[in-house]
Image (cartoon, rainbow, N blue to C red):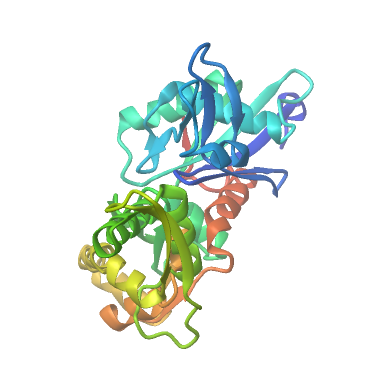
Amino acid sequence: MKNLFDFFTEEIAIDLGTANTLIYHNGKMVLDEPSIVAINRKDGKVICVGRQAREMHGKTHESVKTIRPLKDGVIADFQAAEQMIKGLIKMANLGGGIFGSLRMLICIPSGITEVEKRAVKDSAEHVGAKEVFLIHEPMAAALGMGVNVLEPEGSMIVDIGGGTTEIAVIALGGIVADRSIRVAGDEFTRDIEEYVRRQHNMLIGERTAEQVKIEVGAALEYLDNPPEEYSVRGRDLVTGIPKEIKIGHVEIAAALDKSIAKVEEAILAGLELTPPELCSDIHKKGIFLAGGGALLRGLDKRIHQKTKLPVFVAEDPLKAVGRGTAIALKNLERFKFIERG
């Protein structure tokens, strides 16, 4: 039953990710932008946010700095996070109802501390939220993939985002067992930078490494449909002159091997914490993958080889958490696991 206040309130669901921020309004995605802000060093004013700011990343002069306010899934730079959220909400043409009231549901990692939770809540309030609700990422990912989180059967969700990999076993509207490790998309990008520097004596930036991950990123050396080699440009560490090399998926699979092994270990540790009755459900239903990391070629097959369990990748895994957050916002009273901030 809606009260009068609800008619003057704008409801938005935010998947505040380390790499990308998604905003949903009335169940529809209205914004999908990189989580980055460009600021003028002299006066501290925001120049731009999102895609425009990412275009500047790694190319700025002394008057401009680009900041990624979230690190490992949580707010690392409070002020920049506030400015970024404000800029993104403005970009999405949202700003409250008739009286400017905002109700926000924000996604948070399951391994977040109370202090980090407070930072998320404070940032939301500073950009005009009158009510703040929080939902854990694995729960949102499960909802976004169409999993019935309220049923007594257990489901295992692995959400590989930018800063963290969230592993959770969900049943009866709650998280029964969970693991959160700070090895995810950003770590994979750093692995690629380090590999190219070590193996090819070439320095590449974060954006280039990210592009390599998208074009030829793989978790296995043997793929059914391997991507073509990708041309990478950077600076030769010996001569200092720009040069170009070609990189294939086999090299990237080798570069990412150790980090992916850590994700596999965390999945096994999550299974060890799971009660036997729920293990039986997971054996039948399998493991669900979400997040940008789920797009790594062959990752589902590699996890299957390690766990001997069926592995399913979400449809459009990048948006699974955002979709689930929007579903949760529509059902605030039904889902008791949503926390009031």
Residue 309 falls in which quadrant of the image?
bottom left
Nearer to the camera, 291 or 326:
291
Expressed as whole percent of the image width and height from the top left, the position of residue 232 reads: 45, 62
Q: Is residue 145 above or below residue 68?
A: below
Q: Is residue 151 visible from the viewing direction of this image? A: no
> Along the horizontal axis of the image, is 278 left or right of 38?
left
> Along the horizontal axis of the image, is 138 left or right of 39?
left
- Residue situated furthest bottom in the rendering: 224
User: Count the marks: how many?
Assistant: 0
Nearer to the camera, 113 or 276:
113
Q: Is residue 205 visible from the viewing direction of this image? A: yes
Expressed as whole percent of the image width and height from the top left, the position of residue 213 reads: 44, 63
Expressed as whole percent of the image width and height from the top left, the position of residue 330 reads: 65, 46
Residue at x-position 73% and y-position 44%: 26
Residue at x-position 32% and y-position 57%: 176
Expressed as whole percent of the image width and height from the top left, the position of residue 228 reads: 50, 78
> For the N terminus, which image quadrant?
top right
- Residue situated furthest top in the rendering: 43
Residue at x-position 23% and y-position 69%: 268
Residue at x-position 76% and y-position 25%: 97
